Image (spheres, grey):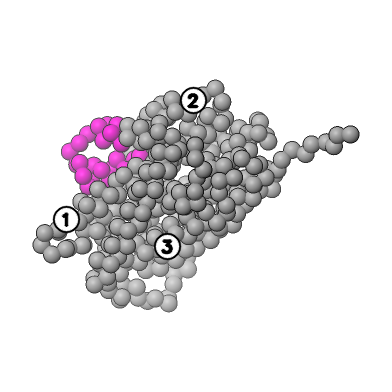
Amino acid sequence: MNKITPRQIILLGIVYMVPFVINGIRSISMAKQHTYVTYLVAAIPFMGVLWMLSRSAKRFPDQDLFQSLVGRFPVIGRGVGFLYLLFFLYILTRDIRIMVDYTRVILLPNTPFIVTSLLIIATVVFIVRGGRRTLISLSEIMGPIVIVALLFVLIMLFKDFHLENMMPFFHMDIPGVSEGTWLVLSSSGQIIMLPFIISSKDYRYRDPLYSLVIGTLLIVLVVLTLILVIGVPVAERLMYPSYELVREIRIADFLDRFDLLFVLLWYPFILINMAISLYVICYGLKIMVPSVSGKMMAAPIGLLSLSCSAWFFRDTIQMLDFNHQWAWIALVFEIIIPIGMFVLLRPRKTPLKN
């Protein structure tokens, strides 16, 4: 496999961080017109976490974090690795349920749940079976396209901005912003995926940092556009506010359904995001259990995540209510354990030989 370039790492991180965050702005009901602040604040601690993970990985040349954990602590390292596999399995399960509900509400309302679910997971499995190079290539294609599309939406809606929707600008509800930051913290923290699947020789600290910064700025731009165009009272009551935002675009009389074109671009973007989660699970399982083929496990794990998406949640509302508890779980995996890795994950000292 050819060496991964910094641009590919940055785009891979953006693809994994942005899609589902923009699809549903979870903190707008708490932070109101200062929702954009919650994403900026949530990104700050992960700048330090990425630095710690980068330093931990650099201690083990030519290895990623899964390999260094297993190599340094064969038992405890595998235990921590399996916990991370469960962590990413839940992320995949949640994203599948969100995507299935989104498809049934926006695109195919009359299609049975099982049919929509199988079509989505089959596509994700085929992407993962292509390996990491397929994921990177798809991210290189779709990442810039979606970024340009988001900027295009911003430009087209500029004439509909209503600055009064940001008022009062300087009166910030600190408790509301704090609660909103707590909810979106786990979304920003998903960027820690990069050191787990990319060898330490292939990236530097600034690569995942650029992913975090660019991804956060894109989210902030979408949130500001949403508030300025639709307003907080309406946006906080919408299940998919970003979709409604795109529907506000009208280009003369020949293109009044720009939302369909945007969904055409957005759907592959989200499928790649879910494929990254499945790839992390399959790759990590291969490292934890060398006799297991990660490629062959893509379909079974995909079907398991599909089943869990139907078992874990009765509906989307129940899944959204779990976000408050999920933030505590994500705190352990995205901040506390990486700090422990930074402190404890060091190469084994070899005795001097005469």
Measured from the top left, where is residue 191 in percent x and y? Answer: 49, 50
Which residue is located at x 24 percent, y 66 percent? 156
Q: Nearer the viewer, residue 166 or 282?
A: 282
Residue bounds of the magenta highlight: 94-121
Mark number displayed over residue 257: 1
SS for tag 2? loop
Amino acid type shown at disc 1: Arg
Residue density around tag 1, few if under 14, some if 14–19, many if 20 or more, within 10 Å:
some
Q: Earlier in the sequence, mark 2 or mark 1?
A: 1
Question: Is residue 118 shown to the viewer in this render?
Answer: yes
Kindly tell me whether residue 24 is visible in this rendering: no
* Chief secondary structure of the magenta portion: helix
How far, Cα to Cα, is label 3 from label 1?
Answer: 27 Å
Q: Position of residue 1 (x, y in %)?
A: 49, 37
Q: Residue at x 52, y 56 (%)?
A: 209
Q: Residue at x 42, y 62 (%)?
A: 217
| Residue beneath disc 3 | 217
Q: Residue furthest top?
A: 291
Residue at (58%, 37%) from the top-left corner?
66
Q: Residues within 10 Å of mark 2 (few under 14, many from 20)?
A: some
Question: In x, y percent, where is residue 208?
Answer: 52, 53
Query: Gap in Å between the C-alphas at discs 2 and 3?
Result: 38 Å
What amino acid is labelled 3 in the image?
Leu
Say which of 156 and 131 sits in front. Answer: 131
Q: Name the mark on residue 75.
A: none
Q: Which residue was labeled with disc 2? A: 293
Question: Of tags 2 and 1, which is closer to the observer?
Answer: 2
